[in-house]
Image: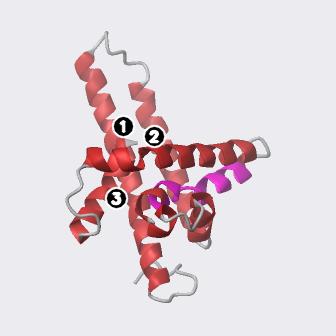
Amino acid sequence: VFLTMMIPLRDMQDRGVHGPMGIWRFSIVHLKTFTLESLRALGWVLLFLPLLIIPGLIKYVQLLFVPYVVLCDPKYQAGQVDALEESQRLTKGLVGILLFITLLSLPIALWIAQFTEPIRVTQSPLLWFLSFLVSSVAYFYFNLLLYELYRVRITRLEKGDPHGTDLQS
């Protein structure tokens, strides 16, 4: 949660959107809605997962932008849009790209977990810390990539691209 919230905060500070708000203040302001909307998204994914793996994955991908909508979208913060519906709107046309990124990151996460799972803190604290650090860095970069896609998508839509799917230029 902390890593997911840190990326948009740093970017918004760089662009001067939020001013000098620290991560703790930002977390306190957004943690409740962030948690509630993430749980709602998880509920929808779990609802679709038993149908088949593919519909569950597609629903998961459609809801990948929920954290960024909650943290960054002024319309959501004003109560004008629903985070889940907005995430689905923003991922429309990008499901293939996002599914590819998700499926690419899954083997990486499983490969890291293969080495980190058997390590207990009591057995080897240093090795456990290093494995935790590696998995945190992988998770951070996955979220960084998702956030950049979210930002590009928002920028394209604001510039008038009716679909906002041209992520190349």
Residue type of the residue flagged with mark 1: Ser
Numbered mark located on residue 34 in the image: none
Secondary structure category for the residue under label 1 = helix
Give the prevailing secondary structure in the magenta stretch: helix
Are circles 2 and 1 on residues that touch, CB within 8 Å? yes
As for residue 66 lying within the magenta part, the answer is yes
Mark 3 or 1, closer to the camera: 3
Q: Nearer the viewer, residue 102 or 71?
A: 71
Q: Which residues are magenta?
A: 54-69
- Camera-side residue of 115 and 26: 26
**Mark positioned earlier in the residue sequence (2 or 1):** 2
Is the residue 153 above or below the residue 30 in the image? Answer: below
Return the residue at label 1: 135
Q: Mark 3 sits on what residue? A: 8
Q: Residue at x 27, y 26 (%)?
A: 129
- Amino acid type of the residue that numbered disc 3 sits on in the rendered structure: Pro
Question: Which residue is painted at 61% across and 58% down in the image?
Answer: 84
How packed is label 3: few (under 14 Cα within 10 Å), some, or many (20 or more)? many
Report, in whole angstroms, how far the alpha carbon at label 2 lies from the one at label 1: 7 Å
Mark 3 to mark 1: distance in Å? 20 Å
Mark 3, secondary structure of its residue: helix
Q: If you read the primary sequence from the N terminus, does the residue marked by circle 3 or circle 1 appear first? A: 3
Q: Residue at x 40, y 53 (%)?
A: 143
